[in-house]
Image (tube, rainbow, N blue to C red):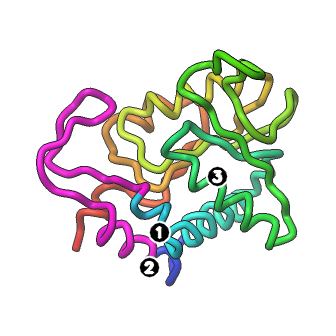
Amino acid sequence: MSGAPRERLLAIIRQEALLRGEFKLASGRTSNVYLDCRRATLHPEGAALGAELLLDWLDESGLAPDCVGGPTLGADPIVGAMVALSWGRRKPLPGFLVRKETKEHGTSKLLEGQWKPGWTAVVIEDTVTSGGSLLKAVHAAEEAGVTVIAVACLVDREEGAHDALHDYPFHAIYKMREVLES
């Protein structure tokens, strides 16, 4: 995957989401760089480009999931943008989000949105480090009866996610080293 949309999204990620300092990551590790990818996925152009690149990847890979989903909060804007753009492409792709914990009221669901047992899904995330959050979302989808056929992210920090997710085809739009090159 190359070209103008990929280069433009990378520029948005570098400009809007790449922060320097000392940060504690979800994995518990510390880092002197932090990617707050929601600053890119909630950017009007960034949202459209991320969805475009992920939908292009699905087309190119031959994967034809029944739905796309991911863990809240990182996947929320990506899933929403993919769902909307898929409609415009005349290839509707329903979406779902995985809560951090089961809702205590109402329907008491862990998965929210458009999915059904027996459907196939690609589970996505904005940034992955160890892959723990993405793997939890995968397991939640599988426990709900959804077959996960692949996982994807915008940026792989290259700190173990690929190994943790070895049971699933894994695709990253960018590797962290690309984001740090300038």
Identity, as a three-letter code, of the amino acid under mark 1: His
* Residue at 57%, 55% in the rendered image: 77
Quarter of the figure with residue 148: top right
According to the picture, the residue beneath numbered tag 3 turns out to be 79
Q: Residues within 10 Å of mark 1 (few under 14, many from 20)?
A: some
Specify whether 92 is left or right of 2: right
x and y, in percent, of residue 21 in the image: 12, 51
Kind of residue sitting beneath label 2? Arg
State the residue position of label 2.
Answer: 8
- Vertical arrangement, residue 104 with respect to residue 134, above or below: above
Position of residue 38 measured from the top left corner of the image (x, y, whole percent): 43, 55
Asked whether 103 or 83 is in front, the reply is: 103
Separation of residues labelled 1 and 3 (CA atoms)? 14 Å
Q: Which of marks 3 and 2 is nearer the N terminus?
A: 2
Give the label on residue 43, or none. Answer: 1
Q: Is mark 2 on a helix, strand or loop?
A: helix
Spatial separation of the CA atoms under disc 1 and disc 2? 12 Å
Magenta part of the protein: which range?
A: 9-38
When the figure is inspected, residue 41 is found, relative to residue 110, above or below; the finding is below
Tell me if 68 is positioned left or right of 98 in this view.
right
Would you identify the image quadrant in which residue 91 lies? Answer: bottom right
- The secondary element bearing badge 3 is classed as helix
Verify whether residue 33 appears in magenta.
Answer: yes
Q: Please tell me whether mark 3 or mark 2 is closer to you in this view.
A: 3
Position in image of residue 136 (x %, y %): 54, 25
Q: How far apart are marks 3 and 2 (CA)?
A: 20 Å
Q: Earlier in the sequence, mark 1 or mark 3?
A: 1
Residue 23 position, x and y percent, is 18, 42
Q: Residue at x 55, y 72 (%)?
A: 49
